[in-house]
Image: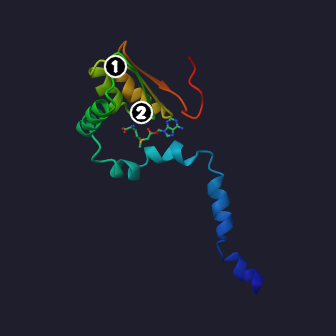
């Protein structure tokens, strides 16, 4: 009797363990899912520009400063910061995002695949 029940039962700890054996961490896969893109649907270039305008004005960042955009995604903030005259480095874990961002790179706007938990090589 117990054996029959056991055969047809899904054991939650096993499911959890199997899921945890997925070699990717959540932050390595979540940002490439359709759900993330639905959630971020309204975050476009104009929203990024508004945000940066407010940030630059609030912190009074002079244009001779260098800016590090950690977890830059496809670079929407970096691109606008560069257009304002800042020297910008955007870094992100995702090869795909950096490949997209690099389409906009120029001598004052660079992108690099990098895990922000590690020190940035000089
Ligand atoms: C919510 S998105 C924001 C992207 C961008 N800042 C924007 O607003 O368009 C978060 C980004 O963080 C990146 N990310 C997550 N963990 C990271 C890590 N440890 N190091 C670098 N980037 C990471 C993801 O690849 C993703 O592009």
Element under disc 2: loop
Q: Dividing the picture into quarters, in which one does residue 117 lie?
A: top right
Q: Dividing the picture into quarters, in which one does residue 88 lie?
A: top left
Q: Position of residue 114 (x, y in %)?
A: 53, 29
Badge 2: residue crowd in 10 Å (few <14, some 14–19, many ≥20): many
Report the mark closest to the observer, 1 or 2: 1
Q: Which residue sits at x=43%, y=48%?
A: 33
Q: Which residue sits at x=72%, y=78%?
A: 6
Q: How is the image coloured?
A: rainbow
Q: Is mark 1 within 8 Å of ligand 1?
A: no
Badge 1: residue crowd in 10 Å (few <14, some 14–19, many ≥20): many
Residue pointed to by mark 1: 86
Which quarter of the rendered picture does the C terminus lie within?
top right
Residue 54 appears left or right of 78: left
In the image, ligand 1 is in what quadrant? Answer: top left
Q: Position of residue 12 (x, y in %)?
A: 64, 69
Q: Going from the N terminus, do you reach mark 1 or mark 2 first?
A: 2
> In whole angstroms, how far apart are the C-alphas of marks 1 and 2?
15 Å
Examine the rendered structure and indicate whether residue 88 appears above or below residue 7.
Answer: above
Residue 3 appears left or right of 45: right
Element under disc 1: loop
Q: Which residue sits at x=26%, y=32%?
A: 53
Marker disc for residue 72: 2
Marker disc for residue 60: none
Q: Position of residue 42 (x, y in %)?
A: 27, 47
Q: Is mark 2 within 8 Å of ligand 1?
A: yes
Which quarter of the rendered picture does the N terminus lie within?
bottom right
**Viewer-closest of 29 and 61:** 61
């Amino acid at each position: 009797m117990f054996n029959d029940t056991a055969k047809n039962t899904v054991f939650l700890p096993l499911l959890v363990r199997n899921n945890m054996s997925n070699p990717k961490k959540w932050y390595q896969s979540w940002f490439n899912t359709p759900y993330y893109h639905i959630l971020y649907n309204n975050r476009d270039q104009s929203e990024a520009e508004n945000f940066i305008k407010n940030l630059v004005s609030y912190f009074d960042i002079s244009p001779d400063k260098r800016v590090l955009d950690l977890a830059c995604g496809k670079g929407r903030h970096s691109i606008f910061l560069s257009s304002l005259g800042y020297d910008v480095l955007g870094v992100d874990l995702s090869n795909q995002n950096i490949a997209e961002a690099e389409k906009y790179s120029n001598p004052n706007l660079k992108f690099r695949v990098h895990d922000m938990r590690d020190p940035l090589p000089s």
